[in-house]
């Protein structure tokens, strides 16, 4: 496949203006929806082969979000695409002012492997809804999911509108050497920096959905049973291979012991296993080895067993951890849960503030002043109070990071906005042209200008 040709053909097609028609965009989204239904069984099978994910998990964490994003876009696309009238300031009176959303053009979407369908196709849905063409480069690590997406899209879509280009670093590098009108990347911080630099060469706007260490703060007054239930689900979903999984827990020292005991009981009750369909394999050997190095045997409170051949790591709790531990030096992205203790909330806030801004932050408390303090004082992409992960399922909440955890956001209207440029237009009638700005200049004209600029 000639990548330059694919891009060039998409650009030529975009320039015909067909993608700007609402009916055209609606048609593409409906087609994608219908293909997802048609390929559902094949896609579930592919992801099961890649890392043992069950149908239940695939539906709740991948298809559910995709169907919801398509349905929300179809319902709102007309409203989102409307020209928006805004007020005109005094200086320009009389005139009309409006904002016109327009698609960027040819977009590139680079996906990550951990939720391979959702993370590849949700940005594509947003790109098409906003009237862009798209090239999708899914992650090469889950090779069966990458193949089935390529088949589903390349056998059914006009490549001038949507095309999947499969491949690893070499292909992504080749893609990035080209000029796109928008790049949407999901993945790690180091690769995010590579993408950002490549985009800068062409002044291409980017959305970077990255990762990092997302803390869960557990205050002494929390409802322990609900807290533990929600945290255990959120951490071990997809065996911890979730960008917004609680990376570590920061618990008030006063309740640490009881919290740990309840954590252990909830993990046992959940009986995580491939057979139960509530657990998955680690994606590859390299990641199994990386994760193994993060487990300090002297800190294991629960779990710690690794089956290298099957690529399964038991849900593992590490206790008495601090920010110097190996598990606190990088994003864990696996089923290892370090528990750190704090004595004052200010100490916890201070530590989190000293680290890169997290993609997500979770707080478990019923105390209004703690909720306000943490929300006001800490910067993070998004998060939840008394829950974890679930904020991503509310399409009214833009999803994305801040600082090192990312740039920009998507899902729902935020996705449409991410793939749109908002063109500002001032329209003047031809009659009435005050002489104020034209020469000859004068003291009194300047006085009027100064007065008018205040409005
Ligand atoms: P990754 O950065 O290794 O890979 C992401 C994509 O970049 C893949 O398509 C890959 O082929 C490509 N790539 C890898 N190396 C490259 C290079 N040198 N040059 C150009 N392209 C390259 O990330 P990953 O392992 O797929 O995903 C894990 C990371 O992604 C974690 O940090 C996680 O937190 C983050 N993540 C973030 C979100 C989010 O929505 N913010 C979602 C999922 C994962």
Image (cartoon, rainbow, N blue to C red):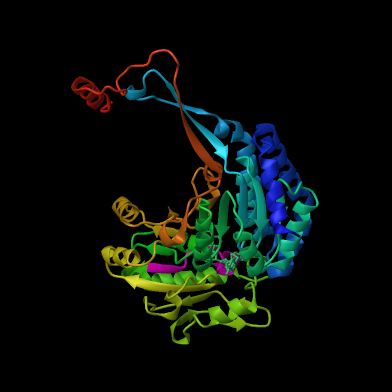
The magenta region covers 236-250
| Front-most of residues 277 and 332 | 332
* In the image, residue 367 above or below residue 428: below
Q: Position of residue 452 (x, y in %)?
A: 27, 24
Quadrant hosting residue 328: bottom left
Residue furthest toward the top? 431
Which residue is the extreme one toward the front?
440
- Horizontal placement of 416 versus 90: left or right? right
Q: Is residue 183 visible?
A: yes
Is residue 275 visible to us here? no
Q: Is residue 436 above or below residue 375?
A: above
Quadrant of the image occupied by residue 4: bottom right
Query: x, y percentage for residue 29?
Result: 69, 42
Q: Quadrant of the N terminus?
A: bottom right
User: Which residue shows up at 55% across the image and 63% down it?
Assistant: 187
What residue do we see at 60% from left, 82% from top? 306
- x, y percent for residue 332: 50, 72
Where residue 432 sits, quadrant-wise, is top left
Image quarter (top left, top right, bottom left or bottom right) of the C terminus: top left
Residue farthest to the right?
155
Give the image quadrant in which the ligand numbered 1 is located. bottom right
Residue at the location (25% across, 23% down)? 441
Find out whether residue 279 is within the magenta segment: no
Q: Residue at x 44, y 87 (%)?
A: 298
Report the front residue among 1 and 430: 430
């Amino acid at each position: 496949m000639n990548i330059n040709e694919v891009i060039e053909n998409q650009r030529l097609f975009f320039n015909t203006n067909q993608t700007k028609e609402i009916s055209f965009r609606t048609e593409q989204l409906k087609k994608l929806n219908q293909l997802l239904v048609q390929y559902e069984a094949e896609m579930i099978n592919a992801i099961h082969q890649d890392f043992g994910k069950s149908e239940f998990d695939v539906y709740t964490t991948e298809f559910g979000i995709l169907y919801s994003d398509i349905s929300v876009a179809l319902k709102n696309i007309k409203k989102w695409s409307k020209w928006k009238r805004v007020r005109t300031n005094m200086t320009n009176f009389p005139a009309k002012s409006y904002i016109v959303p327009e698609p960027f053009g040819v977009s590139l979407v680079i996906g990550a492997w951990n939720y391979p369908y959702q993370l590849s196709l949700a940005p594509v849905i947003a790109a098409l809804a906003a009237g862009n063409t798209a090239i999708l480069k899914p992650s090469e690590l889950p090779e069966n999911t990458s193949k089935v997406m390529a088949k589903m899209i390349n056998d059914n879509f006009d490549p001038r509108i949507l095309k999947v280009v499969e491949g690893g670093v070499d292909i992504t590098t080749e893609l990035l050497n080209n000029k796109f009108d928008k790049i949407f990347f999901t993945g790690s911080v180091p690769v995010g920096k590579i993408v950002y630099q490549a985009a800068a060469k062409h002044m291409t706007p980017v959305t970077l959905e990255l990762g990092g260490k997302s803390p869960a703060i557990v205050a002494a007054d929390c409802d322990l049973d609900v807290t533990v239930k929600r945290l255990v689900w959120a951490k071990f979903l997809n065996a911890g291979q979730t960008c917004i999984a609680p990376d570590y827990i920061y618990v008030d020292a006063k309740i640490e012991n009881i919290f740990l005991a309840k954590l252990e009981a909830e993990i046992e009750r959940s009986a995580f296993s491939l057979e139960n369909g509530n657990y998955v394999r680690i994606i590859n050997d390299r990641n199994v080895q990386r994760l193994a190095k993060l487990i300090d045997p002297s800190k294991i409170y629960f779990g710690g067993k690794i089956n290298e051949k099957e690529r399964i790591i038991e849900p593992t709790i590490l206790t008495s951890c601090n920010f110097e531990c190996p598990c606190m030096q990088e994003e864990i992205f696996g089923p290892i849960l370090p528990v750190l203790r704090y004595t004052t909330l200010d100490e916890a806030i201070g530590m989190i503030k000293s680290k890169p801004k997290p993609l997500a932050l979770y707080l478990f408390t019923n105390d209004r002043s703690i909720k306000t303090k943490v929300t006001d004082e800490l910067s993070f992409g998004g998060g939840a109070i008394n829950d974890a992960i679930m904020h991503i399922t509310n399409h009214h909440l833009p999803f994305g990071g801040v600082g090192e955890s990312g740039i920009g956001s998507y899902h729902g209207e935020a996705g449409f906005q991410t793939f749109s440029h908002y063109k500002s237009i001032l329209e003047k009638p031809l009659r009435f042209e005050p002489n104020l700005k034209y020469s000859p200049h004068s003291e009194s004209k300047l006085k009027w200008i100064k007065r008018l600029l205040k409005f």
